[in-house]
């Protein structure tokens, strides 16, 4: 019996693997592999990654060991889009497993974001807290919850630092693997999202949604339908 196609998922800054529970139920014919970053969720006792080299080396090995040998795709949401392209680069360069049939990039433009590195040390906690709230990652009832921030602020700070250190100018990637880009114009400008075409010069399809940074919460059914169609076509 042929195994289900696999979808390897990479979450946003401060998030955990459970973020993709919302879409897993919409993909019954796909084996959804929800990757966990070190220091997050089920891996909370592990030290945080210092940069995307550590992250991608770790999660590439996890993918290679979890790959069933059949068709698979990658899905990165927000910070997960950077995780995705670095993992994809390792897949292509190392040639130990076949490339994915397609990839899905959401809610992150391929632009270097080094503003975190310029924030004074004494302001980092408040800057990270306000940035996280602005993106809609924190439910209203937890915005002023000190226990919540004691637990999660270190995660956000660690992930934002990784993003701040990452330079898209150094990303040496140009692949024919088909890409689908999910975005909301109120979150990321289409002019910026179009830059993904530089790295995916073959098929690069854009899908616009309404809402804030976490538009997947309202449109997970529609996003799942696009994923299924793209994986089936490929």
Image (spheres, helix red, strand yellow):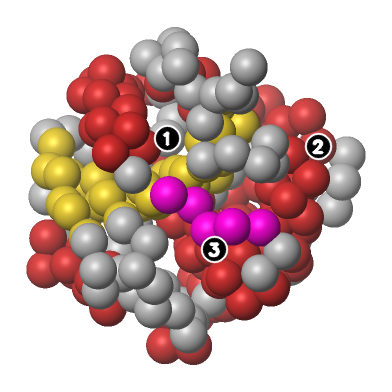
Does residue 152 appear left or right of residue 78 in this picture? Answer: right
Q: Quadrant of residue 177?
A: bottom left
The nearer-to-camera label among 3 and 2 is 3
Q: Residue at the front extreme?
A: 1
Residue 161 circle label? none
Nearer the observer, 203 or 188: 203
Mark 3 lies on residue = 88
Majority secondary structure in the magenta region: loop
Label 3's element? Answer: helix
Q: Quadrant of the C terminus?
A: top left
The nearer-to-camera label among 1 and 3 is 3
Does residue 59 appear left or right of residue 16 in this picture? Answer: right
Tell me the distance, in whole angstroms, between the alpha carbons under discs 3 and 2: 23 Å
Q: Which residues are magenta?
A: 97-101
Residue at image position (63%, 17%) is: 1
Q: Report if residue 123 is visible in the image.
A: no
Label 2's element? Answer: helix
Q: Quadrant of residue 197?
A: bottom left
- Dot 3 or dot 2: first in sequence order is 2
Mark 1 lies on residue = 137
Nearer the observer, 175 or 233: 233
């Amino acid at each position: 019996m042929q195994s289900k196609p696999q979808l390897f998922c990479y979450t946003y800054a401060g998030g955990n693997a459970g973020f993709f529970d919302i879409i897993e139920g919409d993909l019954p014919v796909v084996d959804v592999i929800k990757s966990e970053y070190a220091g997050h969720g089920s891996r909370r006792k592990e030290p945080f990654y210092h940069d995307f080299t550590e992250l991608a080396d770790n999660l590439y090995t996890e993918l290679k060991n979890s790959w069933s040998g059949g068709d698979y795709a990658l899905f990165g949401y927000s910070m997960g889009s950077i995780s995705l392209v670095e993992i994809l680069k390792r897949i292509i360069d190392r040639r130990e497993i076949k490339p994915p049939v397609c990839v899905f990039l959401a809610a992150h433009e391929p632009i270097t974001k080094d503003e975190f590195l310029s924030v004074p040390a004494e302001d980092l906690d408040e800057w990270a807290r306000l940035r996280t709230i602005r993106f809609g990652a924190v439910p209203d009832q937890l915005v002023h919850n000190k226990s919540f921030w004691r637990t999660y602020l270190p995660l956000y700070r660690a992930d934002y630092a990784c993003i701040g250190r990452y330079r898209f100018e150094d990303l040496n990637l140009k692949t024919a693997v088909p890409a689908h880009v999910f975005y909301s114009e109120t979150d990321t400008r289409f002019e910026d999202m179009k830059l993904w075409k530089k790295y995916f010069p073959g098929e690069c399809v854009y899908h616009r949604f309404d809402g804030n940074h976490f538009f997947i919460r309202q449109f997970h059914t529609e996003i799942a339908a696009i994923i299924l169609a793209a994986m089936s076509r490929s």
